[in-house]
Image: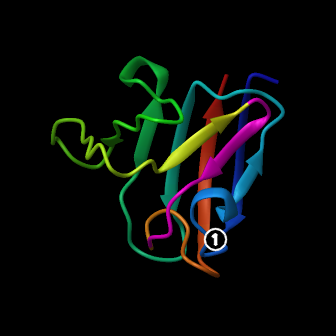
Amino acid sequence: GISKVGSYTGNGGAGDTGQVITTGFNPRLVMIKRASGTSNWYILDTTRGFTSSNNKRLKLNSNAAQDATGSNIYVVPLSTGFRVNIETSEWNANGSEYIYYAHA
């Protein structure tokens, strides 16, 4: 498998307690959207520097330039998936539903 579509329920954690999603591969691209409320479609990818210390992101529903705050690491790539590293309504609110697409 080089890609996976799925969903997760936010756990409200951040950092090491953030929600872990297992894809079976190290993703080079992740797209996430909150399904249980209004939110942006976010894309993080290795072309923009998707690593454990850099999360430049694009909003698919906006014509704005890529956003990189430098202080927020939204998602951390793992060897077998990714961890949502921030507790906000758009990424990992406790009990909220999210959909994702990941590609190796």
- The image's colouring method is rainbow
**In-image side of 75 versus 24 (left or right):** left
Q: Is residue 6 above or below residue 34?
A: above
Tell me the SS state at disc 1.
Answer: loop
The residue lying at 78 percent from left, 38 percent from top is 23
What residue did someone put label 1 on? 10
Whether residue 93 is situated above or below residue 99 in the rendered picture: below
Question: What residue sits 46% from the left and 35% below the top?
Answer: 53
- Given the current orientation, which residue lies at the most extreme left position? 64
27 and 99: which is toward the camera: 27
Residue 4, located in which quarter of the rendered image?
top right
Q: Is residue 98 left or right of residue 6?
A: left
The residue most toward the bottom is: 95
Quarter the C terminus occupies: top right
Badge count: 1
> Is residue 80 one of those drawn in magenta?
yes
Question: For this rendering, which residue is in front, 30 or 68?
Answer: 68
Residue at image x 72%, y 51%?
6
Within 10 angstroms of label 1, few (less than 14), some, or many (20 or more) residues? many
Q: Position of residue 9 (x, y in %)?
A: 69, 70
Q: Position of residue 2 (x, y in %)?
A: 75, 22
Q: Is residue 64 left or right of residue 15?
A: left
Mainly helix, strand or loop, the magenta region? loop
**Which residue range is magenta in the image?**
79-88
Residue appearing at x 47%, y 29% in the figure: 50
| Left or right: where 55 falls relative to 64 | right
Q: Amino acid type of disc 1? A: Gly
- Residue 46 lies, in percent from the top left, at 48, 22
Residue 82 figure quarter? top right
